Image (cartoon, helix red, strand yellow):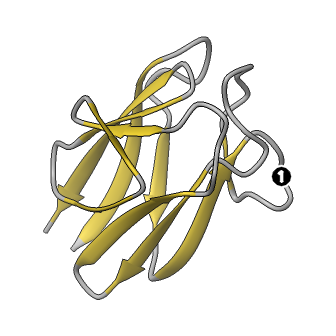
């Protein structure tokens, strides 16, 4: 299975796709240390992480200032599935899964 994060809305990068490979990916405002970057004033330098292990994708908030929301609920950690919607700062992302 191939996992991607698609930017649905935000101040920039609408439609941008972030492919996720096996391992840990950090999302935030700065690169480095983050390999997934979103330049927004409400996005922390290291906002959250995504861990792909086999077919399981997990998101974890990295003590960000504005939190991480999945399907409207604030989360610390959550296993993600296809079409989950994630809010990071002022960005809305969707999980896309291709078989």
Indicate the position of residue 61 as horizontal and vertical percent values. Answer: 52, 54
Indicate the position of residue 68 as horizontal and vertical percent values. Answer: 46, 40
Mark 1 Cα-neighbour bin, 10 Å: few <14, some 14–19, many ≥20: some
**To which residue does mark 1 refer?**
31
Name above or below for residue 59 compared with residue 70.
below
99 lies left or right of 89: left
The answer to which image quadrant residue 39 occupies is top right
**Which quadrant of the figure contains the C terminus?**
bottom left
Name above or below for residue 9 compared with residue 17.
above
Name above or below for residue 51 compared with residue 20.
below
Q: Residue furthest bottom?
A: 54
The answer to which image quadrant residue 49 occupies is bottom right
17 lies left or right of 2: right
Taking depth in this image into account, of 86 and 99 the one nearest to the observer is 86
Residue at x 63%, y 52% (from the top left corner): 63
Residue at x 22%, y 80% (from the top left corner): 55
The answer to which image quadrant residue 86 occupies is top left
Residue at x 18%, y 61% (from the top left corner): 98
Taking depth in this image into account, of 36 and 78 the one nearest to the observer is 78
Taking depth in this image into account, of 50 and 15 the one nearest to the observer is 50
Q: Residue furthest top?
A: 11
In the rendered picture of this protein, how many numbered marks are placed on residues? 1
Indicate the position of residue 16 as horizontal and vertical percent values. Answer: 50, 34
**Which quadrant of the figure contains the N terminus?**
bottom left
Indicate the position of residue 53 as horizontal and vertical percent values. Answer: 35, 86
Give SS at disc 1.
loop
């Amino acid at each position: 299975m191939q996992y991607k994060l698609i930017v649905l809305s935000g101040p920039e990068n609408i439609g941008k796709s972030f492919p996720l490979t096996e391992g840990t990916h950090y999302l935030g405002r700065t690169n480095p240390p983050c390999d997934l970057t979103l330049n927004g004033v409400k996005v922390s330098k290291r906002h959250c992480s995504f861990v792909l292990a086999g077919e399981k994708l997990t998101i974890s908030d990295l003590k960000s200032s504005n939190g991480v929301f999945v399907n409207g609920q604030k989360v610390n950690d959550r296993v993600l599935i296809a079409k989950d919607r994630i809010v990071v700062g002022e960005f809305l992302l969707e999980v896309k899964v291709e078989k």
